[in-house]
Amino acid sequence: MLTVDFSRFPLAPGDRVLDLGCGAGRHAFECYRRGAQVVALDQNAEEIREVAKWFTAMKEAGEAPEGATATAMEGDALALPFPDESFDVVIISEVMEHIPDDKGVLAEMVRVLKPGGRIAITVPRYGPEKVCWALSDAYHEVEGGHIRIYKADELLAKIREAGLKPYGTHHAHALHSPYWWLKCAFGVDNDKALPVQAYHKLLVWDIMKKPLATRVAEQALNPLIGKSFVAYATKPHLPRVATS
């Protein structure tokens, strides 16, 4: 289940991509399939081991085209172990709401991004997220949990302040908002509640089968209750300095 829409976020074979806070690796895997040179970075050692295993399995299965590369590594988003202007593309999906110093993370992403490069940032959307917080303290008051809710204008202002130029936004995963509302209402850790189980089965069926009816429904509902807010931006080229 991808949050970044690659029809709005072009990726060319050979692009060097950083998936920052990659988690289980869903965006990193898609970039690998598209022929990129991918670095998946996360502070969670267990998830990085799993992502590395999947990269190996994908290579053995022939899912990645010739020339594509993939590396999974532990790292700190506030101190990225890469030189300046190392990447053509940076993706950070559902991460910034966890990090106190979000401006520091933005600065690091801008540092490692090449001029003309592209960034995709996704965060929980303000409205659906406010409902989750209102229904359940346990949803966000956990170690490593969500510490803020972004309004779209606030996030875009921070992106501009970091020196990036936003060029597009959208919402995603409308069908997932009711699932999380149910989870929060019945208990975030209570997977046995019948409404939660039933809705989870619906989501799994939708992800696996991709039926037209739910695709159309989600597209129509995304502007209203999309769970995620997605922003795309570029790093401008510096103006040339005239020489005498």
Image (tube, rainbow, N blue to C red):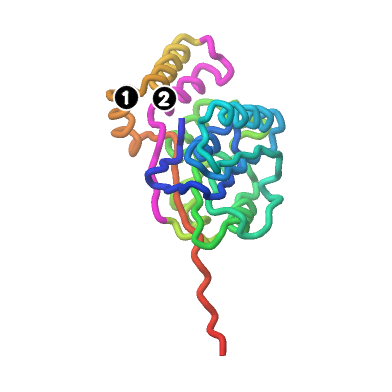
Drawn side of residue 216 relative to residue 241, left or right: left
The residue pinned by badge 2 equals 178
Drawn side of residue 28 relative to residue 198, left or right: right
Against 77, is 216 above or below?
above
Quadrant in which the C terminus is drawn: bottom right
Drawn side of residue 106 relative to residue 31, left or right: right
Against 188, is 243 above or below?
below
Between 77 and 115, the one nearer to me in the picture: 115
The residue pinned by badge 1 equals 214
Between 61 and 15, the one nearer to me in the picture: 61
The residue at 53%/44% (across/down) is 36
Against 148, is 189 above or below?
above
Describe the element under mark 1 as helix, strand or loop: helix
Spatial separation of the CA atoms under disc 1 and disc 2: 14 Å
Residue type highlighted by circle 2: Pro
Q: Is residue 190 magenta?
A: yes
Q: Residue furthest bottom?
A: 244
Give the class, few, some or many, for how many residues have Cα within 10 Å of label 1's Cα (few <14, many ≥20). some
Between 212 and 36, the one nearer to me in the picture: 36
Q: Which residues are magenta?
A: 167-192
| Numbered circle sitting on residue 58 | none
Question: Where residue 136 sits: x, y (%)?
Answer: 54, 26
